[in-house]
Image (cartoon, rainbow, N blue to C red):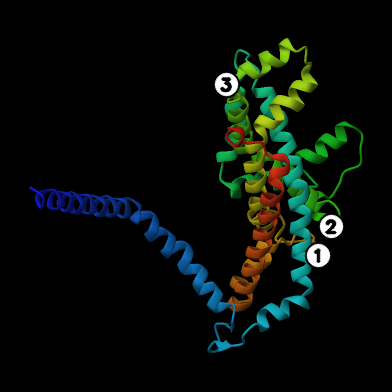
Amino acid sequence: MATGVPQARARLGVRRLKQAQQENAAGYLFISPWLVGFFVFTAGPMAISLGLSLLKTDLLRPSTFVGLDNFVALVDDELFWKSLRNTAYYSLFSVALGMLASLALAFVMNVRLSGIRLFRTIYYLPAVLPSAPVAILWRQIFNPERGLANYLLDLLNLPPQKWIYSERLALPCLIAMSLWGIGSSLMIYLAGLQGIPTDLYEAAQIDGAGWWPKLRRVTLPMLSPTIFFNLIMSIIGSFMVFTASYVMTQGGPNNATLTYVLYLYNSAFRYFKFGYASALAWVLFFVVLGLTALVFRSSPMWVYYESELR
């Protein structure tokens, strides 16, 4: 009897160990498609890109190891700094304007009116359209000779502009085009607004709060995690801008719309400097990583999580 209890506990322990091993195996089996995709399409290309960044490569001669020379060469590359400034300018204004416009439209769409679902669909549709046809459409809008933009200026008795063919206006035109695709963030804001408990507004109403105290004390704090998410995604997306400048302007005029990813693309597939392009890609990775880290670090000062107070 005395030896039966330890044996039973040992058998129970073995069964639990086998059960845990089976659960672990099932877990790895379920996530295996993601693991395969991650290593084949993300980790693998990143490792290859890191290796290429240390090589001098072209299609005519064998690759040679140059160490960090590709990164050092970036310092004296005017196009590198030009594309970085263009992308930073584009990111600053497209993110700020996109965040404000999508948030304002989300407030409007949150009103319970008849037919509001139709308007929500209309505003979301541009977000699902392919980016290349959209860029072609906007190129026609900004056409100096027969475009809609100059037609509207003519109605207002204003002088016509060269738009994307002007060094001064080309990049603002791309920023204006970026507002076309705010439908995704608009819908996320709308979901965040509709997730705010109504009893908070009722309590504020009982306390005599007007619309501004409700907005400042209830809506914005409860919506801050959604704003935080959209801000991170917008920053990452803005630094990835490529199609608009490639299709509409090819980086011109005079490199006024040469974005960072377009310069990276040109380095790799137009000039066949794959090692140099890989170095550009890693610099972009660390720039976006640094900006994202800054936003994360600032989040405790302005992002409110209800669960942290429990």
Residue placed under numbered mark 3 in the picture = 117
Q: Amino acid at mark 2?
A: Glu
- Are discs 3 and 2 less than 8 Å apart at CB? no
Q: Is residue 157 visible?
A: yes
Which mark, residue 182?
A: none
- Are discs 1 and 2 less than 8 Å apart at CB? yes
Secondary structure of the residue carrying tag 3 is helix
The residue sitting at 67% across, 84% down in the picture is 69
Q: Is residue 142 visible?
A: no
The residue sitting at 77% across, 59% down in the picture is 86
The residue sitting at 77% across, 50% down in the picture is 92
Mark positioned earlier in the residue sequence (3 or 2): 3
Number of numbered discs on residues: 3
Please indicate whether residue 13 sits to the left or right of residue 47 in the image.
left
Which mark, residue 254?
A: 1
In-front residue for pair 7/176: 7
The residue sitting at 50% across, 72% down in the picture is 47
- Are discs 3 and 1 less than 8 Å apart at CB? no
Mark positioned earlier in the residue sequence (3 or 1): 3
Specify the quadrant of the image occupied by residue 152.
Answer: top right
Farthest front residue in view: 2
